[in-house]
Amino acid sequence: MHGRSAIRYGCVLVAAVLAVGLIGLLRLGRQFPAAAESPGLLIPFLMPVLTLALEAGALVALSAAVLSLGPELMTKPLAERVKAALPLLGLLLASLALAELLPRGTERPGALANDLIERASASCGAGKALVPIPLLGLNVRCGQPSRVEGPMPGAASVQLGMQQLRFSDDLRSVEITDLELSAKRSLSLKLQVGTARIVGLSPWTRSPRLSRLGRFSIVGAVGGALWLAALAVIRGWRPGPNADAPPRRFWRALTLLLLASPGSAAAAVLVALDQGQADPPRYALSALAGVGVLLSLQLLFRRARFSGRFLMLGAPPS
């Protein structure tokens, strides 16, 4: 049992990390449209994406692995269920420890972006008319004064020109001086603004408010609450008339997605709290989200009278 559940944990972990990491890469690609031209500069931004993906993936994998133990544990007392599923809690903590051991990258991505702009401006001279700004896909047009020009990220048809561009440290806002915006589609549009401040930009990084130990403790507590709730819930699941039916691949995949949904909900709230740099006590909402979805699954399974074999990666009900 331990071997099968550990393998399932590992498989779901890899899939979840790849999925969350891909979302993070897509969001970084929108913020830094010229990243392909200088991928080395993107590494400080990639490390927070990797660690956040590993933490979120660990919660998803824990949910799927623990709930898949239902057929073996549903008739056992809580103490025996806890003992049998203890290795999965150990795998979760090991995954979180690995995430904390990885280099944290930059916790001030906006400061790095501002430094790239300043270095490009300082490179003007010796007959240079245009200096590219790495990652941002913009250029500095040399002159007195110099100006930042280029397409708007995510909207190449919109051209921007500005005297000064400065990001906040967390990339959540940007201040622009002497902005000129022009767009040519069915109608030509030109906008001039003396000073503009854009807020509500969506970063993709872990919250800098939490230390390594604090983060390990908080995410570990969220995972522990989800682990214990899952062990308590599977006590109420019973095998039905199709418990001995042979497994089918489609239903196995569908069931695995359902069993991973409580961890997915907890991970989604965790990521959202990180983006908002929430206070540490608010991370309890992540655990509540996972437990809420878990209870919803219990009601769904009981109401539909699915067989225990179907619930735990087996065949569909009749």
Image (cartoon, rainbow, N blue to C red):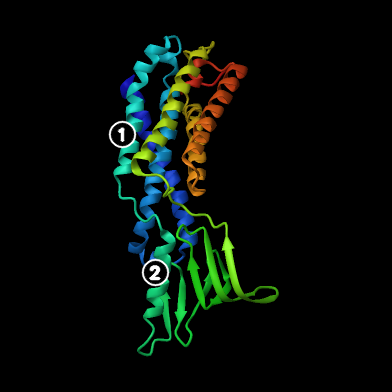
Residues under labels 2 and 1: Cα distance?
36 Å
* Residue projecting furthest to the bottom: 127
Residue at the outermost right position? 187
- Under tag 1, what secondary structure? helix
Residue type beneath disc 2 = Asp
Q: Could you say which is closer to the camera, residue 248 or residue 106? A: 106
- The residue lying at 35 percent from left, 63 percent from top is 41
Q: Residues within 10 Å of mark 2 (few under 14, many from 20)?
A: some
Quadrant where the C terminus is found in the figure = top right
Which residue is at 43% across, 39% downward? 56
| Residue sitting nearer the eye, 94 or 254 | 94
Query: Residue 314, can we see it?
Result: no
| Residue 230, x across and y down, in percent | 47, 22
Residue identified by numbered label 1 = 94
- How far from the left and from the top, in percent, is residue 206? 42, 48
Q: Amino acid at mark 1?
A: Ala
User: Residue at point 35% right, 89% down?
Assistant: 126
Q: Residues within 10 Å of mark 1 (few under 14, many from 20)?
A: some
Q: Which mark is residue 115?
A: 2
